[in-house]
Amino acid sequence: MIKAELIYFVAVVIAIVIIAINAAAIAETILRLMSPVAFVKNRVGGLKGYGRCPNCDNSWYWKESKSVTFKRSAFVSKGVLICADCLQTPRGLNPERIAEALAKSQWNKEEVTLARKAIEQLMAA
């Protein structure tokens, strides 16, 4: 009987942890949307085929883009588009989120790593 109660207790604790993690992710998404106006603008941008800032997830439909460049080789440079608002406060950039977004956009691992290093250097400056 004690084992069954213990298993039930552990299962309940695990369920609560999973719910808390999902709630945090949902809250983060809601905060990133910022306002009903941003929500509508992002949806319109999505319907029109615009991409999104990899840091704040707002659509290029209504956000001005800037670039963080990095060198792939001695002759080749590449840039990560990040919205001007996010670049105004470089310490607010989230390198993990940006790296995940670039990987989802089918960037290769080497480019994701180089882009992440460039963003971390920008944040440290």
Image: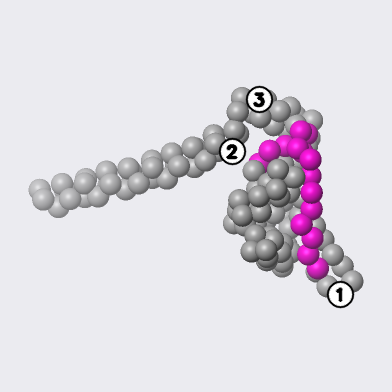
Few, some or many residues within 10 Å of mark 1 (<14, 14–19, 20+): few
Q: Quick one: SS at disc 1? A: loop
Task: Answer with mark 3 or mark 1, whichever residue precedes in sequence.
Answer: 3
Expressed as whole percent of the image width and height from the top left, the position of residue 8 reads 21, 45
Expressed as whole percent of the image width and height from the top left, the position of residue 125 reads 67, 63
The residues tagged by marks 3 and 1 sit, at their Cα atoms, a distance apart of: 44 Å
Few, some or many residues within 10 Å of mark 3 (<14, 14–19, 20+): few
Task: Answer with mark 1 or mark 2, whichever residue precedes in sequence.
Answer: 2
Q: Quick one: SS at disc 2? A: helix
Q: Is residue 45 above or below residue 14?
A: above
Expressed as whole percent of the image width and height from the top left, the position of residue 19 reads 38, 41
| Magenta span includes 37 | no
Q: Which residue lies under the disc numbered 1?
A: 74
60 or 35, nearer to the observer: 35
Give the colour scheme of this rendering: one colour
User: In the rendered image, is residue 8 in sight?
Assistant: yes
The residues tagged by marks 3 and 2 sit, at their Cα atoms, a distance apart of: 12 Å
Magenta stretch bounds: 57-71
Expressed as whole percent of the image width and height from the top left, the position of residue 16 reads 32, 42
6 or 46, nearer to the observer: 46
The residues tagged by marks 1 and 2 sit, at their Cα atoms, a distance apart of: 37 Å
Q: Is residue 100 above or below residue 27?
A: below
Tell which residue pokes out farthest to the left in this image.
1
Q: Which residue lies under the disc numbered 3?
A: 37
Q: Which residue lies under the disc numbered 2?
A: 32
Tell which residue pokes out farthest to the bottom in this image.
74
| Residue type pointed to by label 3 | Val
| Residue type pointed to by label 2 | Arg
| Residue type pointed to by label 1 | Ala
Q: Which mark's residue is nearer the viewer, 3 or 1? A: 3
Q: Are marks 1 and 2 in contact (CB under 8 Å)?
A: no
